[in-house]
Image (tube, grey):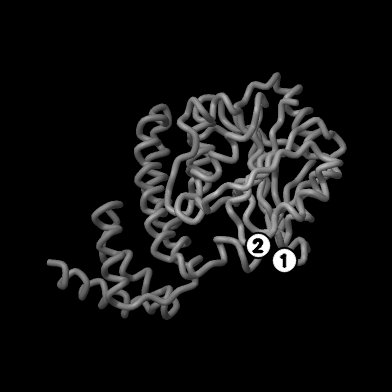
Amino acid sequence: MDIAIVIPAYKRQYLEATLLSILTQTDKSFNVYIGDDNSPDDIYEVVKQFEARLKISYKKFADNLGATNLTQHWERCIDMAQDEKWIWLFSDDDLMDTNCVSMFRRALASTNSKYDVYRFNSKIINHEGVVVQNNTLHPMVENACEFAIARLELQRSSYAVEYIFSKQKYIGSGKFVSFPLAWSSDDATWISIGSDKGIFTIPDAFVYWRYSFTNISAVQHLVKEKIEASIQYLVWLKKWIITNCKSDNTIISRYEKAKNTWLKHQLKLLNKRFTVIESYKLSLAFNQRLLIPLSKSFLWFFDINFGPLKVKLKKQLVMLVKKITI
């Protein structure tokens, strides 16, 4: 077996559906590793139903590491794998088409295993498993610089469960790039692992990312951590681009423009109203750490709180903020 499907598990609500989608793979030449993050749910009660039909290794960890450092939990789950060359970090609530493994093997054969990162296209499902969004398709082949900027420019979506990666390259790259809540850690890691050879998209098979009321994307009380992670990611990405994208002079200018679009989008995703003090403090942080003009980001919060402002009022606010900060 050269494929390890690794599931960092904490919730059991959709785990049975996830394992059923793995069980129905037309190519079953893979091993499954399930790392129980000391869940209050009885994860093993679900897992044991599949032990006779899948090659499963299960471990319940003594501590809930995911609550404090999610990427470290991902890493210890991957450490459960044995001699497999390829790691597919899946989740405890998402689904895969029945031909995903077979299409991955076909992609390996057609590319002579050239790439360190392979990915599927994806669709979004709701808590009932119904498809609610068909995501934009990825290019067949994409270098890491272009992928990084395309994500900042909001050209398409990307989810951790889409990616199968070389374990050797993953270890050699320093494993996961860590940010709070692992927010954007997956993007940063694919960029890092794919920096030499790029990313190849596996055709004719999809994974299904579940947007429910229980995943981190829907949790509203982790606002500070998500904003801090977003800042750290943008700082990390600029350094990476400067080092790795020297041959493309347009990338850094696209980054400078797109970082504002991406960061404002992240703020809107938080679905939160910000007080004037919060808005000012965050604008100050964006200015000091990301060099975004204070007046620009301060207006973002007004737009988020009250909707797009009239041009005249925006100009007055810009002048006010500039006076305050002189």
Residue toward you, 301 or 11: 11
Quadrant in which residue 278 is drawn: bottom left
Residue 173 percent across, percent down from the top left: 47, 29
Residue assigned mark 1 = 127
- Residue 59 is marked as none
Q: Position of residue 215 (x, y in %)?
A: 60, 61
Is label 1 in a helix, a strand or a loop? loop
Tell me the quadrant of the picture where the N terminus can be found: top right
Callout 2: few (<14), some (14-19), or many (20+) C-alpha neighbours within 10 Å?
A: some
Describe residue 120's horizontal placement relative to residue 299 as left or right.
right
Count of all numbered marks drawn on residues in the image: 2
The earlier-in-sequence mark between 1 and 2 is 1
Q: Is residue 290 left or right of residue 138?
A: left
Q: Is residue 260 above or below residue 86?
A: below
The residue under the point 43% across, 48% down is 179
The amino acid on which the numbered mark 1 sits, given as a three-letter code, is His
Q: Is residue 186 above or below residue 173?
A: below
> How far apart, in angstroms, are the residues tagged by discs 1 and 2?
7 Å
Callout 2: SS: loop
Residue located at (65% from left, 59% from top): 11
Q: Which mark is residue 211?
A: 2
Q: Quick check: 86 above or below 218?
A: above
Q: Amino acid at mark 2?
A: Tyr
Residue 82 x %, y %: 65, 28
Farthest residue to the front: give it: 62
Residue at (22%, 72%) from the top-left corner?
321
- Furthest residue in direction top, as rendered: 112
